[in-house]
Image (spheres, rainbow, N blue to C red):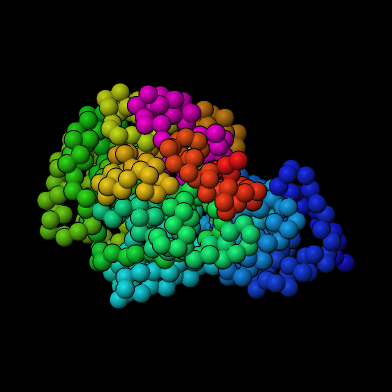
């Protein structure tokens, strides 16, 4: 016999819901409503970062905007703690709550491309690989991240950058419109002209303003191949190579992005076995543009130092977007720390290289994305995403499997973060913030845009229904 379900409320208390309440909700849903132990309940609540193991009391597995509206209204009506999950990749784990209602969007994965108009309509459960594959059927793409299993929704709401961003901007710079269910349960279509305050706020303000049920993106004709690959240097030469690297990338055209990673070398087939497991500097480059021009443009990168291995050539864009997937599978423990930089000083390079000598686990790495170019041609106040002055974004990507190593691994990340603080801008990419960094949201993640965001939050979500995120408090 069905029994009463106790759920956490937003005020920190709890409420007991009788079976009739759940039946009423169930009657409004197209997708399943799940209780602990029922099919796919765990699938919905498990996320990429194994450090986060939260157990909601109820899961709505939405199949459309109607289900989202029903779940949001139900949460509001009963004062429930609500979490919204898309790809489940966010390191902080805000996609899931303990004891509350989980609105799982991961079944809403459709992507519809309009090749003539060069646009795509994407549902919030789609992952980057879904979007890339559909768009690439027509030689099209929009800038997304570098791991194909990341969710389009969370990535977009925080900004979104990847290999194409220096040429075409952030993911949000390519957002044309979206549908969002706001805290009052209304579905609103938002464009630059309709609800311009929401259009501004959602582009970098995360999930603070409602649940996005559909995104419309602009696409670019990039063809189906990029010129891309890896160059590997021993750690002993890393400081020297990075000093030269910063000059080379400062002169790089928009079509070229060169990221670097300090880590132990994986057993790559093109790397001599004696280097496997040793600390190395990996330069990862991607040219999207005319292939002949690309050969010249990547010359200065290939000319840096004496690489111990090189694997660069034409590669299908979809394959390049999946290159790092094997190293980023779900289920490991992860703790990240991030800074942004306008330049890489000698001191910053030396601190990075020194920390790479004491990596706490073979899976851990220090990654540096080269951003700038088109991203920075948008004013910092034009969207809620404020890091328009950054040339580099660091992700101290600490990753391990054994819970007994938690303290050591977290301490290593924090130590490197502290050492890099004097060289950093003070801004942080909201999508790279771990669970314990909520106080950094203001000003770090939202910068000078915070006050405006807070006023818009007060207009659309005065009771802070959407609080499982890097939260923006409603202005009082
Ligand atoms: C392996 C890996 C690689 C990454 N690489 C990149 C990269 O190259 N570039 C980059 O920019 N970022 C990158 N990221 C960061 C990524 O952008 C964030 O983790 C992002 O939040 C993931 O989105 P998601 O939908 O998978 O996450 P989720 O954890 O499902 O959601 C993240 C947050 O967004 C909220 N949310 C999700 N969907 C909605 C919605 N439809 N409406 C309202 N709120 C919603 C959730 O409540 C949660 O607070 C990477 C992350 C990982 C784990």
Q: Residue, x 52% and y 32% (percent of image)?
A: 410
Q: Residue, x 28% and y 32% (percent of image)?
A: 343
Q: Is residue 432 visible?
A: no
Q: What stretch is highlighted in magenta?
A: 412-440
Q: 111 or 263, which lies in front?
A: 111
Q: Can residue 111 be seen in this view?
A: yes
**Quadrant in which residue 113 is drawn:** bottom left
Magenta-span inclusion, residue 73:
no
Residue 309 x, y percent position in the rendering? 24, 44
Q: Is 93 above or below relative to 211?
A: above
Residue 403 x, y percent position in the rendering? 60, 37
Magenta-span inclusion, residue 433:
yes
**Quadrant in which residue 249 is drawn:** top left
Main SS type for the magenta part? helix
**Quadrant in which residue 266 is drawn:** top left
Residue 281 x, y percent position in the rendering? 30, 37
Residue 350 x, y percent position in the rendering? 31, 25
Q: Residue, x 30% and y 76% (percent of image)?
A: 116
Relative placement, left or right, of 331 versus 61 is: left
Q: In which quarter of the image is the C terminus?
A: top right
């Amino acid at each position: 016999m069905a029994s009463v379900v106790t759920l956490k409320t937003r005020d920190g208390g709890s409420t007991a819901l009788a079976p009739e309440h759940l039946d009423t909700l169930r009657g409004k849903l197209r997708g399943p409503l799940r209780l602990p132990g029922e099919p796919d309940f765990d699938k919905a609540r498990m996320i990429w970062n194994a450090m986060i193991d939260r157990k909601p009391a109820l899961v709505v597995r939405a199949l459309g905007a109607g289900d989202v509206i029903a779940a949001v209204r139900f949460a509001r009506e009963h004062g429930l703690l609500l979490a919204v999950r898309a790809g489940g990749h966010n390191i902080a784990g805000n996609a899931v709550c303990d004891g509350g209602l989980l609105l799982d969007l991961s079944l809403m994965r459709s992507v519809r491309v309009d090749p003539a108009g060069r646009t795509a309509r994407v549902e919030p459960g789609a992952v980057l690989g879904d979007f890339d594959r559909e768009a690439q059927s027509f030689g099209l793409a929009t800038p997304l991240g570098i791991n194909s299993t990341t969710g389009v929704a969370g990535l977009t709401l925080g900004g979104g950058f990847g290999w194409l961003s220096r040429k075409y901007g952030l993911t949000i710079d390519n957002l044309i419109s979206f549908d969002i269910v706001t805290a009052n349960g209304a579905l609103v279509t938002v464009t630059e002209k309709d609800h311009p305050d929401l259009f501004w706020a959602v582009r970098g303000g995360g999930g603070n303003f409602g649940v996005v049920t559909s995104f419309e993106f602009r696409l670019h004709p990039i063809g189906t191949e990029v010129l891309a690959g890896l160059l590997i240097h021993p750690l002993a030469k890393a400081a020297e190579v990075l000093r030269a690297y910063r000059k080379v990338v400062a002169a790089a055209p928009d079509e070229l992005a060169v990221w670097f990673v300090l880590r132990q070398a994986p057993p790559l087939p093109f790397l001599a076995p004696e280097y496997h497991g040793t600390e190395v500097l990996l330069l990862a480059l991607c040219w999207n543009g005319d292939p002949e021009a690309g050969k010249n443009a990547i010359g200065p990168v290939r000319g840096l130092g004496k690489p111990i291995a090189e694997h660069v050539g034409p590669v299908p864009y979809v394959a390049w977007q999946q290159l790092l997937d094997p190293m980023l599978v779900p289920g490991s423990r992860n703790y990240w720390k991030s800074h942004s930089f306008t330049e890489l000083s000698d001191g910053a390079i030396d601190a990075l290289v020194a920390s790479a000598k004491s990596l706490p686990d073979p899976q851990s790495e220090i990654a540096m994305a080269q951003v700038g170019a088109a991203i920075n041609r948008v004013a910092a106040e034009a969207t809620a995403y404020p890091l328009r002055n950054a040339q580099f974004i660091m992700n101290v990507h600490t990753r391990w499997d054994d819970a007994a190593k938690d303290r050591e691994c977290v301490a290593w990340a924090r130590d490197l973060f502290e050492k890099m603080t004097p060289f950093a801008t003070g801004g942080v990419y909201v999508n790279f913030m771990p669970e314990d960094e909520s106080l950094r949201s203001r000003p770090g993640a939202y910068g000078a845009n915070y006050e405006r965001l807070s006023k818009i939050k007060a207009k659309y979500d005065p009771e802070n229904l959407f609080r499982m995120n890097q939260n923006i408090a409603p202005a009082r």
